[in-house]
Image (cartoon, rainbow, N blue to C red):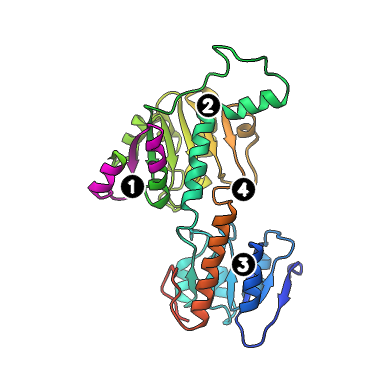
Amino acid sequence: MSEPLAATSRRVEGKARVIVTRRLMPDIEQRMSQLFDVRLNDDDHPFTRGELVDVMNDCDVLVPTVTDTIDAAMIEGAGERLRMIASFGAGTDHIALAAARARRVVVTNTPGVFTDDTADLTMALMIGVMRRMREGTRIVRHGEWRGWGPTGMLGRSLGGKTLGIIGMGRIGQAVAHRARAFGLQIVYHNRRPLPESVERMFGAEYFADVDGLLAQSDIVTLHCPKSAATHHLLDERRIALMKEGSVIVNTGRGDLIDQEAMIAALESGHLWAAGLDVYPDEPVVDPRLIAHPYVITQPHIGSATEEGRTAAGMKILANIQSWADGHSPPDRVIEGYA
């Protein structure tokens, strides 16, 4: 039996029992408490698997985040009371969707609200690594700066470089829109080409083959979902295909890159730099990445704005309320039954 949860229970007769695995924005928690019988995670600790199993037997609606793995065994073993999983975040790779469908559990997510925020951070990482901002900040803070000089702290220009975007969905296109303003040439890989009119808008060239895109790109940024097909999409072989001295930016999922292969390429100089917001073993970040002067490491903050997190919370409220009222939620991921 797992330890009791450090959580607040607010029972309101006749209302859906909702358990939230992490803290949400205060206004969202307040409104959720008004609408539903809510149990909140007051100390914001990440739930263990045992805790998730316990709460799934004690709620009508579970509100997990993308860091909560809800596997098939957990869904199959959940009590009959569980009817909905209203996930915070756009990704659904952490939820066993087939098992949810089999149990007739409705699954929803919060698509679209983090697009601009994640694209902004992607550009920030791109600019940061190209202009050596991590190293510059360090030498100023440590009192090592000796003043301006013609050859001091030389980085690289963005203008004229080729940006390879792997995954041209909402976020990939938002990155392309921003990148064009910085004078980057856009090439992209997607499951299928974008409409010709959209390609013209971005001045983008489609590559059906990832290998070909890598060979052409000075900077590669990843915006594809986590799946069996994309696990270690950039492996040792593909990283070797990249241009000597190229750059990787990843605000997608940590498992998209073979981390050992990337570190080896950074240490050999084949890769010049990397800007990373996600990692395969979060919250653990490999010390070699932290130590590398040309690697910027951020703590998974792609969606971390007040506006974005509030908008996601509003989507969760709307999804749960719609389901509770007997309607199909607007952000339904799979076919389920209320």
Residue at the limit of the structure toward the bottom, as seen here = 14
Residues at marks 2 and 3, CA–CA distance in whole angstroms: 38 Å
Judge the density around disc 4: few (<14), some (14-19), many (≥20) Cα neighbours within 10 Å: few
Q: Nearer the viewer, mark 2 or mark 1?
A: 2
31 or 82: nearer the viewer: 31
First in sequence: mark 2 or mark 3?
Answer: 3
Which amino acid does the dot numbered 3 rest on?
Ile
C-beta proximity under 8 Å, tags 2 and 3: no
Residue type (three-letter) at the residue carrying disc 2: Arg
The residue beneath circle 4 is 282
Q: How crowded is mark 3: few (under 14 residues within 10 Å), some or many (20 or more)?
A: some
Please identify, in this view, whether the residue under mark 1 or under mark 4 is nearer the observer: 1
Dot 2 crowding, Cα within 10 Å, few <14, some 14–19, many 20+: some
Range covered by the magenta-colored residues = 176-201
Q: Is mark 3 on a helix, strand or loop?
A: helix
- SS label for mark 4: loop
Residue 91 place in picture, x, y as percent: 49, 58
- Distance (Cα) linking label 1 and label 3: 35 Å
x then y, percent, for residue 271 = 48, 27
Q: Residue at x 43, y 67 (%)?
A: 333
